[in-house]
Image (cartoon, helix red, strand yellow):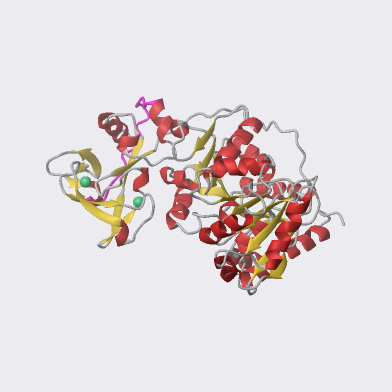
Amino acid sequence: MRFATKNGILFPRKEDSLPISKISNLLQPPLNPHYSFSSKLQELLTGKQLLLDDLPFSLIDIQEHYENGYVTYRKGIIYNGKRPTCTRCGNNDPYWFATMPCARCGEQCLYCRHCIMMGRINECTPLIGWNGPTPHSENLSKLDWKGNLSKGQQEASDRVVAAIQQNKELLVWAVCGAGKTEILFKGIEAALVDQNRVCIATPRTDVVLELTPRLKTVFPQITVASLYGGSEDRHHYAPLTIATTHQLLRFYDAFDTLILDEVDAFPYTVEESLQHAVVQARKPTSAMIYLTATPNEKWQRECRQGKRAFTTIPARFHRYPLPVPRFEWCGNWQKNLQKGKLPPPILRWINERLAVGKQALIFFPHIPFMEKALSHLRQLDQTIEAVHAEDPDRKAKVQKMRSKEIPLLLTTTILERGVTFPNIDVAVIGAEDDIFTESALVQIAGRAGRSIDYPDGVVTFFHYGKTESMIKARKQIVSMNMEGVKRGLIDV
Ligand SMILES: [Zn+2]
Ligand SMILES: [Zn+2]
């Protein structure tokens, strides 16, 4: 869009005007307390940064709110010298920009390709936000939960409450199966009682879908917005929002408390735009809670050096130690598979489980090897299955595994986290592959022994040469178990 300026205030014009990114010295019009603003627009825009196309309002309405100080216009793209940066996603890599003949500004117009799936940001695009009062939120934020926390959970829960009340950052390092959702309840309640806006963000849509009904149940009196690609809740103002990290790109200066689950999970770790989105979605004074079972090396070091506030839950709620992985050398398994065979130690491991009917998850580094192993293993049992990320039957196969229709499920790292089967053993074939990082291996080992009825399980890493990641993963598990014993969270 093109704007003319008068005393630093923008007016949409065709003539004597410029695309918004080319205008310097923008001023925000002062708030006119006598203006009767639209409460629908207030609901939609509070804590957001949206495009005109996202809003069911005309430019005339929006402009009137802007002139009265209730709406803000920020540049969609800003220039640092000649170098553009996308304000929404933080992209400043020239590769991710392109130009197009633009109907809105009538010029050859630069746009960001990086966040285009959320609607295109051009250099003539104003990002629209809210500057008026926040909507009145429901004052009925009592927690409705009768469950009990374990001793380890209770200690972490107290730390979370304190961090939220003091607007601090805190990392909660909780082993797989520790029960990390429950430790958030008290902290969320404390924030809501203070009329603060809370968001739980996670890299994975599956987690949003799993958390939403749980939080709606324990906070039955408030609106809970659930945001992921294709969800319906986009236009609600909610005291509690559960969202994928991608959806945070639409938020700006929104949350008093931001809880980021699985900080170590893809794609959050590799996409800087998502980290940018988290920073923008927080208010300048806000609490930040990170949750993970497997912090990366840098964060682990910061914890050890006292540079990062953290708390651990080293034991599962059922008070049994985590299964410690065993390493078993299996020779050149790739060569074996190419000949259509499996190395004898692996075959023995599998046969033992098939003989007694113990279910197992078997991880492979790459799909082609998994497919080769599958056709070989089907000679032993026709019902053995394999899954990977693009598999259209992925959900159905996981369900079949759960209902015990499948004796063995072969998988890529897609099932390294988020799935729980009550009584399984776990094997990794080719644990030396680069894809099996320390955190991937800790997560994989964390699939075993989760249920109170079957608290142990065998975890075996078959390898053709031990790696640093394997050793560190085992060390992390052993030291968590030791800490659990020392703090009286594990029965020995
Ligand atoms: Zn344009
Ligand atoms: Zn962008």
Is residue 313 shown in magenta?
no
Count of all numbered marks drawn on residues in the image:
0
Residue 456 visible in the shown view: yes
Residue 473 visible in the shown view: no
Is residue 38 shown in magenta?
yes
The residue positioned farthest toward the left in the image shown:
15
Query: Considering only vertical position in the picture, is 66 above or below 166?
Result: above
Q: Give the percent coordinates (x, y) of residue 185.
A: 67, 40
Q: Is residue 417 left or right of residue 127?
A: right
* Residue shown at the point (59%, 43%) measured from the top left: 397
* Residue shown at the point (62%, 66%) measured from the top left: 431
Query: Considering only vertical position in the picture, is 29 above or below 64?
Result: below
Pick the quarter of the image with the N terminus.
top left
Q: Is residue 391 left or right of residue 70?
A: right
Along the viewing direction, whichever of 121 and 481 lies nearer the viewer: 481
Q: Give the percent coordinates (x, y) of residue 145.
A: 71, 33
The residue positioned farthest toward the right in the image shown:
492
Q: Which residues are magenta?
A: 23-39
Pick the quarter of the image with the C terminus.
bottom right
Along the viewing direction, whichever of 300 and 475 lies nearer the viewer: 475
Q: Give the percent coordinates (x, y) of residue 362.
A: 64, 56
Along the viewing direction, whichever of 279 and 266 lies nearer the viewer: 266
Q: Give the percent coordinates (x, y) of residue 263.
A: 56, 54
Q: Main secondary structure of the magenta part?
A: loop
